[in-house]
Image: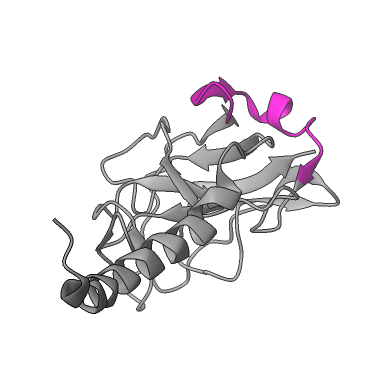
Amino acid sequence: MLNKKNIPLILALAIPIIMIVLVWAFIYFPGIGQKPTHNFIYMTGNNIYYYDYNHRQYEVSGGHLVENPVPTPTVPNQPGYIKPDNSVPHFYIYDVAKDTATELTFDQAKTYQLDSSNTSSDGYVIQQGNYSGGGLLFGGSSGDYNSWFIKGHNRSRKLNLKLTGVSSYYNFQFLGWVE
């Protein structure tokens, strides 16, 4: 039986719980049903990063993938130098609807019209996993630096990337969103 003396106590306990549920609903419900629509092209291979971080061997210029000559490092032991292993880079197109990556040749990859901005036109970004924690109520992601995620609209999904080499920490380069 509900005692009239207990109504203020019940309300005092229920209001914070109702507020938490409402805040959660306003944050997460708008993203329901939204899915990324733009595929993207990425590159993997141990020669992605080399001694000069201001230059890339492959980059998007004028909306297309181009190859830049790799300058010869003058001081192999200088700080920041990562010796390339001269492996052949691998290019992939990632189908966000099927959650699959398909390998491309450089000639195939350079035919795509690409947008190299970090955020796709439908509001998604590719981000590396971290150890930020979080949970059901406060978001967060997997505690794994070797995982990559597509994030947007209060949603996050781990990508099923094909990577070459030992570590995907240095072995993934996002090139651009397919337009």
Q: Position of residue 68 (x, y in %)?
A: 68, 52
Give the residue drawn at x 82%, y 38%: 113
Q: Is residue 166 above or below residue 20?
A: above
Q: Position of residue 146 (x, y in %)?
A: 30, 48
Residue furthest out toward the right: 62
Q: Nearer the viewer, residue 171 or 20?
A: 20
Q: Position of residue 46 (x, y in %)?
A: 39, 45
The image quarter in which residue 83 lies: bottom left
Q: Is residue 139 visible?
A: yes
**Left or right for 81, reference 125:** left
Reply yes or no: does residue 147 show up in magenta. no
Colour mapping used in the image: one colour
Q: Is residue 29 above or below residue 135?
A: above
Q: Nearer the viewer, residue 24 or 2?
A: 2
**Left or right for 157, reference 64:** left
Give the residue drawn at x 30%, y 54%: 136
The image quarter in which residue 91 lies: top right
Give the residue drawn at x 23%, y 72%: 13
Q: Position of residue 10 (x, y in %)?
A: 22, 70
Q: Range of the magenta residues?
A: 96-114
Q: Nearer the viewer, residue 107 or 98?
A: 98
**Left or right for 108, reference 7:** right
The image quarter in which residue 11 lies: bottom left
